[in-house]
Image: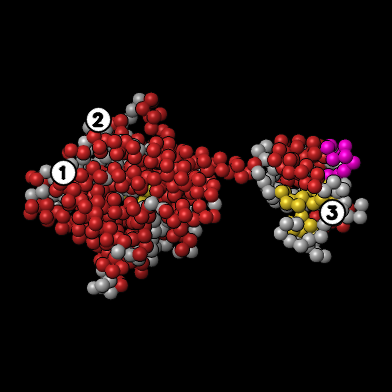
């Protein structure tokens, strides 16, 4: 029995210390209360009735708290997955709310299945191939799309689409449907939320101490929600044409099988599900690994994949749309004192209470406030700083950022991400195809050899020392060959060519053939080819190949050994 419990009960719960319970409870209550309007807004952003935002913050959160890799990451509905859900399910927008919700659950189920499979296959390493430029550009472009998409709730203009051009063109077509009172409510709410978020230094701290000002800033969106509900009831905004969320169904999400479409429909959703799984993993892992490092805890990328996968799989069976680790809610969770996943379980209790007891109370809430909440929170995801930094330090990463950002705005989320990834991989291939090959000399009387263009070093008339700073493969072998021949032309008196292989971790078949050809070319000129500092794993691969067995020169353990043996001819 104890062994079964050990497998079913997570380590954090088996080792739980009651001393941390008060801080976990407080953090869970704070996060639960503060993200209610955010969860409602993200459901609307996904094209679903607001109540689905609360559904998405129950079962998936419980599963992740039980199985996820992070002790403090707060999982739930987030902006990126919400807008990707809306974008991918656009063809089903007119199929009815119930059918659309079933398709959203199916998408979450598919995302969860892909993440879980990736976890079982231990594909956590894939995260390192998503460059900072691509992820920042994609998130920034999505943030702009999300911002523009919410204008329909602030203006009552029925805009639609999956790109910036689509949104703006439909907005222009229906501009006459602008509702002035809705716009006024939305603008005021947006201005207040932006002021609270970005000017709290002087908005709150003029009257309050630093600690109270911090709490005032966090609680303000919830206070604004309450005020908007009261004003809506008192001034009869609904009767004046302001769209309100209406009565939220009471009760917990039920076990509901997602819609099972035909094979063609499922295949259409599969690419989107794959991209969503990738984005969920990358964004959630970024948050979880960052806080693990700050808290001096371990982070397991494969366990993160499994936890996120099972969270979305279970959510797909309980009326949820796709969820991920949230940047803002995790920050609130940590700042509020969360120590373990117990805080997330307390947050679930808050969501259940909202569904059971407060559904009717939220009915007068204007959609304009939810739209303004999303718009104010999404501004911070437009990552201009990363673009500036990349432009100064790495133009190729900046190009990946711009490609992903522009692609998302012009062609939509899925295509934009693919474009960004293609540019990133093209940059990687371009860099690998032009490896650095340095002519080096001996530094003083030491065993160190450095670039002749950077250091005052000694060279030898009969020796040419070249250091190859990249693994050799089919993509760069010709480039390296040309660089070596050019160096030999610069030093025609050198009879011995020493290739320093200290940075070479692999030599593929094409590169081996290139070096073999070089060996023969040098032999025709009465010159010899030598290698130094060949790593053991590389020697294991090439040791019994013609490259070594037919080598005109020798393989030396170190460059100093080669120079001492050859410098006097």
Q: Is residue 184 left or right of residue 439?
A: left
Q: Position of residue 108 (x, y in %)?
A: 35, 40
The part of the image, by quadrant, that contains residue 101 is top left
Q: Is residue 526 left or right of residue 224?
A: right
Confirm whether residue 181 shows in the render: yes
Q: Nearer the viewer, mark 1 or mark 3?
A: 1
Residue at the extreme right: 569
Q: Position of residue 25 (x, y in %)?
A: 30, 63
Q: Range of the magenta residues?
A: 520-531
- Residue at 80 percent of width and 55 percent of height: 559
Q: CA distance from mark 1 to mark 3?
A: 82 Å
Label 1: which secondary element:
loop
- Sooner in the amino-acid sequence: mark 2 or mark 3: 2
User: Where 458 falls versus 435 (above or below)?
Assistant: below
Q: Nearer the viewer, mark 2 or mark 1?
A: 1
Seen from the viewer's position, the closer of residues 338 and 218 is: 218
Q: Is residue 151 left or right of residue 116?
A: left
- Sooner in the amino-acid sequence: mark 1 or mark 3: 1
Residue at the extreme front: 490
**Residue 95 image label:** 2
Mark 2, other Cα within 10 Å: few <14 / some 14–19 / many ≥20: few
Label 3: which secondary element:
helix
Mark 1, other Cα within 10 Å: few <14 / some 14–19 / many ≥20: some
- Residue at 26 percent of width and 52 percent of height: 373
Q: Is residue 281 found inside the magenta-colored segment of the image?
A: no
Q: Position of residue 288 (x, y in %)?
A: 43, 55
Number of callouts: 3
Q: Which residue, given by chain and number where applicable, does mark 1 sit on?
A: 179
Q: Which residue, given by chain and number where applicable, does mark 3 sit on?
A: 562
């Amino acid at each position: 029995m104890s062994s079964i419990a050990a497998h079913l009960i997570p380590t954090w719960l088996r080792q739980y210390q009651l001393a941390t319970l008060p801080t976990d409870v407080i953090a869970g209550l704070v996060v639960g209360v503060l993200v209610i309007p955010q969860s409602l807004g993200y459901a609307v952003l996904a094209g679903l009735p607001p109540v689905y935002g609360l559904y998405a913050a129950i079962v998936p959160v419980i599963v992740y708290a039980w199985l996820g890799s992070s002790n403090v990451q707060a999982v739930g509905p987030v902006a990126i997955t919400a807008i990707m859900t809306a974008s991918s399910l656009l063809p089903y927008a007119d199929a009815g709310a119930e059918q659309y919700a079933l398709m959203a659950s199916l998408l979450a189920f598919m995302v969860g299945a892909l993440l879980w499979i990736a976890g079982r296959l231990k594909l956590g390493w894939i995260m390192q191939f998503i460059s900072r430029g691509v992820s920042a550009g994609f998130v920034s472009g999505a943030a702009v799309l999300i911002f523009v998409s919410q204008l329909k709730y602030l203006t009552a203009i029925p805009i639609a689409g999956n790109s910036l051009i689509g949104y703006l063109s439909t907005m222009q077509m229906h501009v006459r449907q602008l509702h002035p009172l809705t716009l006024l409510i939305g603008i005021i709410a947006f201005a207040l939320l932006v002021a609270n978020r970005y000017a709290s230094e002087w908005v709150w701290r003029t009257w309050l101490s630093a600690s109270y000002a911090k709490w005032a800033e966090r609680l303000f969106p919830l206070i604004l929600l309450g005020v908007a509900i009261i004003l809506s009831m008192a001034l009869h905004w609904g009767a004046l044409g302001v769209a309100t969320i209406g009565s939220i169904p009471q009760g917990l999400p039920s076990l509901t099988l997602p819609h099972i479409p035909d094979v063609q429909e499922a295949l259409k959703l599969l690419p989107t599900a794959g991209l969503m799984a990738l984005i969920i993993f990358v964004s959630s892992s970024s948050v979880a690994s960052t806080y693990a490092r700050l808290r001096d805890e371990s982070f397991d990328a494969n366990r993160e994949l499994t936890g996120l996968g099972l969270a979305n799989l279970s959510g797909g069976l309980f009326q949820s749309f796709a969820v991920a680790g949230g940047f803002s809610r995790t920050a609130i969770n940590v700042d509020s004192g969360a120590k373990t996943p117990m805080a997330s379980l307390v947050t679930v209790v808050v969501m259940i209470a909202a569904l059971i007891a407060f559904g009717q109370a939220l009915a007068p809430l204007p959609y304009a406030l939810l739209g303004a909440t999303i718009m104010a929170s999404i501004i911070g995801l437009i990552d201009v700083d990363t673009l500036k930094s990349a432009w100064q330090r790495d133009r190729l990463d900046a190009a990946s950022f711009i490609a992903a950002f522009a692609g998302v705005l012009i062609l939509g989320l899925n295509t934009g991400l693919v474009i960004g990834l293609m540019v990133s991989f093209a940059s990687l291939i371009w860099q690998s195809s032009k490896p650095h090959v340095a002519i080096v000399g001996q530094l003083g009387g030491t065993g160190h050899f450095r670039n002749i263009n950077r250091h005052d070093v000694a060279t030898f008339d009969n020796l040419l020392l070249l250091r190859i700073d990249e693994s050799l493969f089919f993509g760069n072998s010709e480039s390296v060959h040309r660089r070596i021949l050019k160096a030999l032309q610069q030093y025609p008196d050198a009879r011995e060519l020493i290739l320093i292989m200290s940075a070479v971790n692999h030599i593929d078949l094409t590169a081996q053939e290139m070096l073999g050809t070089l060996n023969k070319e040098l032999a025709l000129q009465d010159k010899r080819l030598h290698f130094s500092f060949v790593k053991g794993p590389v020697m294991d691969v090439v040791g019994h190949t013609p490259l070594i067995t037919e080598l005109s020169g020798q393989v030396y353990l170190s460059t100093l050994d080669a120079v001492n043996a050859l410098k006097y001819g």
